[in-house]
Amino acid sequence: MTATQISDLILDLQARGLRLEAPMERRTGGAGPTDCGMLWVAGHPVTAPTEGIAKDSPYTLRAEDDGYGIYRDGVRLADASAQRRPRFYDLSTADGVPYWQIALLHLDSVASTVVQHCAYWGNDDQCRFCGIGLSLAAGRTIARKTPEQLAEVAVAARDLDGAVDATLTTGSTRGIDRGALYVARCGQAVKRASGLPVEAQFEPPVDLDVIDEVGAMGVDSVGIHIETFDPAVLARVAPAKARTGIEGYFTAWERAVAVFGAGQVSTYVILGMGEDPQVTIEGCKRAVDAGVYPFLVPLRPVIGTPMAGWKPPPSSYTRPIYAEVLAYMIRRGMTSATTTAGCARCQACSGLSSMEPVLLQIGPRPQARPEA
Ligand code: SF4
């Protein structure tokens, strides 16, 4: 397949999903993109829906003698390799907490929601796309992970399963740091124990000096997620974030870029929630100019949330937005290799990095992957 054909396939898989004819590791519940399969397609890391809309997808994943193949109408389109069950999932802490309730392996990143409560969950402020409370209710995780637990699990994920970084997120609190200091403390412990680069994700703190404190704890990258640049959509889907406002995010990002450096600050930008595409593109370009990586992702409706009935946007919608923003980023020297740790390093939930070879005229981005 050409680089363009691979990219087209990945964008379409993220829009239409993948029917599984073979077992594979999946992610259910939690913050961020979920209810998905995690795999490499022609060497690119990809998450794609495997529930809901996926039942009508033309794409199937089949096991083969050596790995997997992606098929459409019986025609084999691409090689795939799926994440095996991580070895560290079989371990437990000395006090009996299974490691998989503390952190999960998202392809090659050990990831955890360090505090599984959010001040907005269950009230009018809840982000409509978010599933942070669902995995706790289902008993798939524990409410609060300690720095010591996370450090222990990160070392095991590195040694047993080849994790190359750690992605730590948190629900928001009503304190002036909005939870940033605790997730940073967890990141500090993970980094000291494992040496892995760490991304910490949090809401803009009320007191921006908190960002300096997060930097002093040694975190490599931060995610401060605006979710959409369209103010009307932000008000509808994330009322608490709308109170911070678009300008409030830029103020926090500028402080964060001064601490962590250009490209080490990223934001999720979700496509497919009714936003104005031009407002979205202009917001992304302004973020790039400020040194912020706009991590564009298609909406991944989470079962059990208010947006469960929505569908991911078609690739005909996402592709031109990716293309325009990506071209702008490349002109300013920002690529998927820029960010040290976290979601924008991994790239699996976005179609952005699959389009880089097309725009840069190079082969697929080589990816670390676990042994088969
Ligand atoms: S701030 Fe929004 S996206 Fe983040 S955990 Fe709370 S409800 Fe979920």
Image: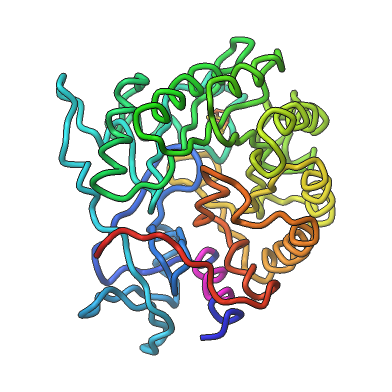
Residue 277 x/y as whole percent: 79, 56
Magenta-tinted stretch: 7-14
**Residue 288's spot in the image, x, y percent?**
77, 47
> Is residue 12 within the magenta segment?
yes
Q: Quadrant of ligand 1?
A: top right
Image-quadrant location for residue 322: bottom right
Q: How many numbered discs, if any?
A: 0
Residue 198 higher or lower than 148, as above or below: below
Name the residue located 46 percent from the left edge and 24 percent from the top edge. 188
Relative height, residue 298 to residue 152 (above, below): below
- On screen, 213 above or below 348? above
| Dominant secondary structure, magenta | helix
Q: Is residue 127 left or right of residue 183?
A: right
Residue at the image position 23 percent from the left and 53 percent from the top: 85
Counting from the top left corner in percent of width and height, residue 131 is at 46, 37
Left or right for 370, reference 222: left
The residue positioned 34% from the left and 78% from the top of the image is 69
| Residue 272 sits in quarter | bottom right
In the rendered image of this protein, does residue 177 appear above or below residue 360? above
Looking at the image, which residue sits at the far bottom? 75
Residue 45 position in % (x across, y down): 46, 62
Of residues 190 and 346, the one nearer the viewer is 190
Q: How is the image coloured?
A: rainbow
Furthest residue toward top = 175
> Dividing the image into 4 quarters, which one contains the C terminus?
bottom left
Closer to the camera in the image, 121 or 160: 160
Q: Can residue 115 be seen in this view?
A: no
Which residue is rendered at x = 56% and y = 21% of the image? 180
Residue 310 in view of the camera:
yes
Of residues 267 and 35, the one drawn nearer to the viewer in this rendering: 267
Q: State yes or no: residue 185 in magenta.
A: no
